[in-house]
Image (tube, grey):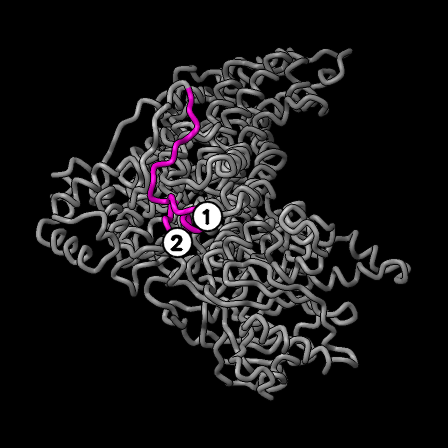
Amino acid sequence: MLRRTRTAKVYTEPATDDESDGMAGNQKDDSEELEEWLPNLNEGKPKGSGRKETDETAEKKKVTKRVAKPKEPKPKEPKPKAERKPRAARVPKAKKEKANAEQQTKDAVLPKLESQQHVTVKEERLSINLNSNNAALPRDMPDECPSSSQHFPKVKKEEPDDSFTFEEPAQKKQKTSNATQGRPIKLKSANSYVEDLQMNWDAIQVLAVKTGVEQWVCANIVQLFQEENTIPFMVRYRKELINHMDADAVRDVQLTLEELRSVAKKTKSVAQTLKKEGVLTSELEVALKNCTTTDEIDHVYAPYKKGSKLSKARRAKELGLEPAAQALLQSPQTLDLHSSIQPNTKGLSTLDEVATGVQEILADMIAKDKETLTYVQSLCDRSAVTIHSSVSKTALKEQQPQEGNQKSKPKDIAKFSLYADFTSDIHRIQHHQTLAINRGENLKILTVKVNIPDWVKNDFCRWCINVRWRPQGFARPELMTVLKNAAEDSYKRFILPFLSRGYRSKLTSSAEKESIAMFVRNLRQRLLMCPVRGRVIMGVDPGFHHGCKIAILSPTSQILHTDVVYLHGHAKHKEAEKLGHLMFKYSCQTIVIGNGKACRETEAFFTDLIKRQFFKPLDVSYCITDEAGASIYSVSPEAVKEMPDMDPNLRSAVSIGRRVQDPLAELIKIDPKHIGIGTYQHDVSQSLLRAALDGVVQECVSFVGVDINICSETLMRHIAGLNAGRARNIMEWKEKNGPFLNREQLKLVKGLGPKSFQQCAGFIRINPETVRSVSSGGNEGLEVPLKKTAEKKKKVKGFNPLDQTCIHPESYSIALRFLSQIGGSLDQMGSAALRQTIESSVKSSGLDVLAKSLDTTPETLQLIVDGLTQPPGFDIRQDFEQADFKREIVSMSDLHDGMVLTGRVTNTALFGAFVDIGVGRSGLIPNRFITPEKLPVDQRRRSLALGPGQRVEVRVINVELQRNRITLDLIRLLR
């Protein structure tokens, strides 16, 4: 098939076969193309398109006579809704459930697909799977996956990107209409929120479209956030209102909500600025209020920005050429450009200058028209748009002269060798590739360009002349030439840069979102590692010249002894005897070594002692733990306050030991960005990353639960509903009044009002055993008088067994009625007898029937059942991975291809997972080896594939001793 060679600068690659077929129908001789601009060809449909459906063409022709935006009446505000209808009509094309995996990259199809897939939501959610092997575990706990609950600042637009899934749609796109326990509730507050935005679109409807969540659920979530509810509280205690969405899905709605709020705020600010400058017209105000993204606002506002030079269109309007431009579209037969010539005025002195001015105004009108932008975007959606990166001229110039002064530049260029001549389809580029390209561009090492095929420009210009901007009467050839040039100029100067910025913004936003999701997932896995309880532990911060810092900790993390030993010097035998004496003195059988400098040598030292049975009769074992952030923590104000008289180096050893004893309690003291998780943390939005990680910390702490009488102030401030001030007030109350005996006493703390109590009460535990250990004397069973106020002068009763559970105080009366109904009592909580009674009652009557008889919801009753059947001291982390302890060492030289090993995931990145196999260097499992068939059924999503702390069985693929690289293949996930 022959086709004409395209020479435009925008696209330099050959077209695909599909494009060739479409372009063949558009090839014309120059004479034929010239005839297309003439108005006397009144045919039923535009020539040469071949890519626009008949229905769409007919629909566009209906608005042909609306040639310019000034002619559009202001009441036509629901126009964006009308434009959404054709997209919705295309959804049924992908209704086949068998094709879900193939259709997951089509954004228009996603909402329908996800509504069909809702049955599997609970199995696929990014959540904590707790009920796999323990019948006593709560049935709905997988929905309580920790994630972010912070109110985020303005964020970039999030576009659907499902490339990180295997075969299911993205979690954020799950429809909730088919949920059996969903309960639509119309909320007044949500409507008031929509009115507050003062935009031409419905915020709840846009929120539902962007997130794929039903409108009634979005309305409920909006009101819950307006009422200052936290995400942990919503996910655990308001499941019926959010239709069982997990924390990550709720957070995604929150992010999109903040985005829409920022768009409305920016629209209002821009409108006020334009009004002060006296350039705000009714049409411009409508265009601003139609924008749903900040990119669209910037596109509309760009020509009016203060400080920028006057745009060509505005200069032409000031010369009085706007009526001529309007006349060309509305009554071209009466337009005479010669009448606008003014010989003594610059810009109007010749006919060419007048024609150019009219062209500039038309180009500006075309570029700001929403229907025009929608059409050109639809053309791009059907074309092969690519992104290309190459080494910048600046980097090449700096590499050549005086290499002595530019030693770092060649190294930086070498780091980006993969992207020196890189081309990828815009829909197939990986997230880590986008972030790497952005980093190279920011360092001025790479030049990045978005390539759009030439046929998009040709079809766009043809559509503008023949359909959208077609004159309403006969136009002479010279006027049609002006209109043609205006369409081409508009595409080149405005629309093409706008499309390129849009694609780059979407890619960056999607990559940042996935990178932050990776951070969130890794941090959650790290915080929820199972604590090692009941052991005396020796924490070791290894070192050469300054010695190894050691700290011996009691089973309750109290510091028993600290010291510095020199294990790698001439007196190492003497130091070994010193270590042995300390191990016997404190009956310490567990050693935790940090993975920093001298780690391998220190590990070899202890391995040699264990082999020689130096510590006999003690059965000593050791483990390696990540010490990232320990040095930063050791000099932080938090560490100084906790260990004021201790050397900072010894504080590091204490932190290393405590990371194994209770990872959650220790790691929350450190900035999450310093824990050593995730990738590209400096290339994403820092405010968004910080908010997401802080939210995950809050949710992990809340879902695990906190014993209020023994937890630290640092841990307490991360409970949902609390902050630093309230945590400090709680600590002061305990110092003054003694330990808390029940949750009701929290209401007496200064600054902790009804809303804060509602949010935090369900996540706080009151354990009688810890109260007895904290209390002085034997009065733990008596009523304790509290401080009196004008309103509260009564004594609070003693312990309430329900305060040890996840049951919220607002449901205590329901729990008591339920126990009375089945013939149980609070004394039986956690016992096998009560569990059997409850299970038989639920099985015989059904959860829904029991809930109705108690005048509550099935979700609340299920939570009550979980709280009553969980054993005392239940910890959701008990089924998570624990640190690996060993007694021997393997070196990298012992590895060979095909060897099968077990290891533990230390970190995951956008391109694979790093696994510690005990040789001092983590191996990498590339993403191509993490396939669905190697994972359990409940983890067959890339977002759930592997995370820090998980044990895996791997096969060695390749060992590069010179580069210290190990490539592994995943065999299976161990449980």
Foreground residue, 834 or 216?
A: 834
User: In what element is the residue under mark 1?
Assistant: helix
Determine the residue located farthest toward the bottom in the rendered image. Answer: 612
Q: Earlier in the sequence, mark 2 or mark 1?
A: 2
Q: Please name whichever residue, 440 or 946, is drawn nearer the observer in this view of the structure.
A: 946
Label 2 neighbourhood size at 10 Å, few (<14), some (14-19), many (20+)? many
* Residue pointed to by mark 2: 126
Most foreground residue, 561 or 818:
561
User: Is the residue 438 above or below the residue 288 in the image?
Assistant: below
Residue 551 seen anywhere in this rendered image of the structure: yes
**Horizontal arrangement in the rendering, residue 409 relative to residue 156 (left or right):** right
The relative height of residue 526 versus residue 797 in the rendered view (above or below) is below
Residue 798 position within the rendered picture, expressed as x and y whole percent measured from the top left: 32, 39
Residue drawn 68% across the image and 49% down it = 644
Q: Nearer the viewer, mark 2 or mark 1?
A: 1
Q: Position of residue 64 (x, y in %)?
A: 41, 25
Q: Which residues are magenta?
A: 765-789
Residue type at mark 2: give it. Leu
Q: Position of residue 488 (x, y in %)?
A: 59, 35
Q: Nearer the viewer, residue 815 or 459?
A: 815
Q: Amino acid at mark 1?
A: Val
Q: Is label 2 in a helix, a strand or a loop? A: loop
**307 shown above or below 711:** above
CA distance separating discs 2 and 1: 38 Å
Q: Which residue is mark 1?
A: 774
Image quarter hosting the C terminus: bottom left
